[in-house]
């Protein structure tokens, strides 16, 4: 007599019998475990996802529809859809979607097409220094104008080099290069972008001087490695916060500029990628608790900039005409 396969289900701590012809979802529901399946078990969502803790070899191969969804969400091999998985022998699973909050998170993942787990990226931290009371001594309109222009210019440069602004914290900006698809040039592109950002701020400082305001000083650090990104707001797929050692080190590099009198410091990992192109200033040893870090001051880069995306420049006349057309209606109504 063939032994009936059993299914251990966590966190419910239940032991269920499961027929080889039924899916794990069917077995859970038959056992009065209210496992969530928003689409009704048709693999049109991923709310029935489970983690196979033991017995992955006893699971049926993923169906074509499950393979497509798993690829979109970047599932590891041991995360399966309960509605598509059958067992040839016993297994232990953990249910991953337990309440409405989990459903909201999965809805976000399906919308953005990424689960945002671990990525190999180059992180750039940019911070405006030297004008600590900028928002206290300037008129509100001037603050909006200057900072709006700053962020607009920075975004154009970042996008040109294939970067993504993952988070903005006051005057600090965190940028990821290689977030969509990592390649060895991510660190190189981050460095070129940083140097171009310096030039853009110098141009902005010319305007500030005309307005009788103190100049903005930009401080940046760059490090690369494996980073876990966590979405902060479900409705904004690009608003991500990085976790892990890489995020801590890039913050340490940027902060060290103030103490060392530098503007752009990169880690040893970044330097190894760009050393044949970079003009290096000071070499610095940084210590933070038990961490010792070799940092390099980058003054310039040689060669051709690795531009990923050319930002289209709209002629000034066309921009003015577009602006007039956009607001002409409101002017006529107010007159």
Image: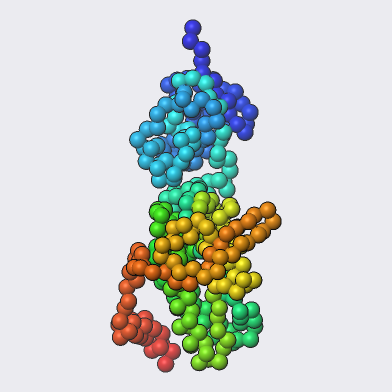
Task: Provide residue 215's location: percent of width, then percent of height.
Answer: 55, 84
The residue under the point 35% across, 35% down is: 64
Q: Is residue 287 left or right of residue 311?
A: right
The residue under the point 52% across, 35% down is: 50
Task: Provide residue 251's location: percent of width, then percent of height.
Answer: 59, 62
Q: Nearer the viewer, residue 21 or 146?
A: 146
The residue under the point 49% across, 41% down is: 47
> Looking at the picture, does residue 129 appear above or below residue 329?
above
Q: Is residue 41 left or right of residue 242?
A: left
Task: Provide residue 77's location: percent of width, then percent of height.
Answer: 46, 35
Q: Is residue 48 left or right of residue 325?
A: right
Would residue 255 be seen by someone viewing this image from the given angle?
no
The residue under the point 52% across, 38% down is: 36
Quarter of the figure with residue 66: top left
Give the quadrant of the C terminus: bottom left
Quarter of the figure with residue 15: top right
Would residue 297 be seen by someone viewing this image from the given angle?
yes
Quarter of the figure with residue 137: bottom right
| Colour mapping | rainbow
Task: Provide residue 237's location: percent of width, then percent of height.
Answer: 47, 57
> Looking at the picture, does residue 253 appear above or below residue 62?
below
């Amino acid at each position: 007599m063939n032994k009936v396969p059993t299914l251990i289900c966590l966190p419910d701590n239940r032991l269920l019998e499961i027929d080889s012809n039924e899916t794990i979802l069917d077995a859970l529901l038959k056992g009065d475990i209210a496992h969530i399946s928003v689409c009704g078990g048709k693999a049109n969502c991923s709310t029935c996802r489970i983690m196979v803790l033991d017995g992955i070899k006893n699971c049926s191969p993923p169906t074509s529809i499950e393979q497509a969804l798993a690829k979109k969400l970047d599932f590891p091999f041991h995360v399966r859809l309960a509605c598509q998985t059958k067992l040839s022998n016993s297994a232990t699973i953990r249910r991953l979607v337990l309440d409405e909050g989990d459903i909201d998170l999965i809805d976000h993942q399906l919308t953005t097409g990424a689960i945002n787990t671990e990525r190999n990226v180059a992180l750039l931290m940019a911070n405006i220094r030297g004008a600590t009371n900028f928002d206290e001594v300037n008129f509100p309109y001037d603050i909006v104008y200057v900072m709006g222009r700053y962020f607009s210019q920075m975004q154009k440069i970042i996008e040109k080099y294939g970067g993504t602004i993952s988070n903005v914290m006051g005057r600090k900006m965190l940028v990821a290069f290689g977030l969509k698809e990592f390649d060895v040039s991510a660190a190189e592109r981050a460095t070129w972008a940083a140097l171009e950002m310096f030039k853009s701020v110098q141009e902005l400082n010319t305007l500030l001087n005309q307005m009788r305001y103190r100049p903005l000083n930009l401080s940046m650090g760059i490090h690369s490695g494996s980073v876990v990104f966590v979405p902060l707001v479900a409705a904004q797929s690009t608003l991500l916060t990085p976790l892990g050692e890489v995020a801590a080190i890039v913050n340490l590099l940027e902060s060290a500029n103030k103490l060392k009198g530098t503007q752009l410091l990169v880690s040893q990992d970044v330097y190894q990628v760009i050393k044949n192109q970079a003009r290096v200033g000071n070499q610095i040893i940084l210590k933070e608790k038990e961490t010792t870090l070799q940092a390099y001051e980058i003054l310039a880069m040689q060669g051709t900039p690795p531009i990923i995306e050319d930002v289209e420049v709209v002629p000034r006349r066309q921009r003015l005409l577009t602006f007039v057309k956009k607001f002409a209606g409101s002017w006529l109504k107010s007159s």
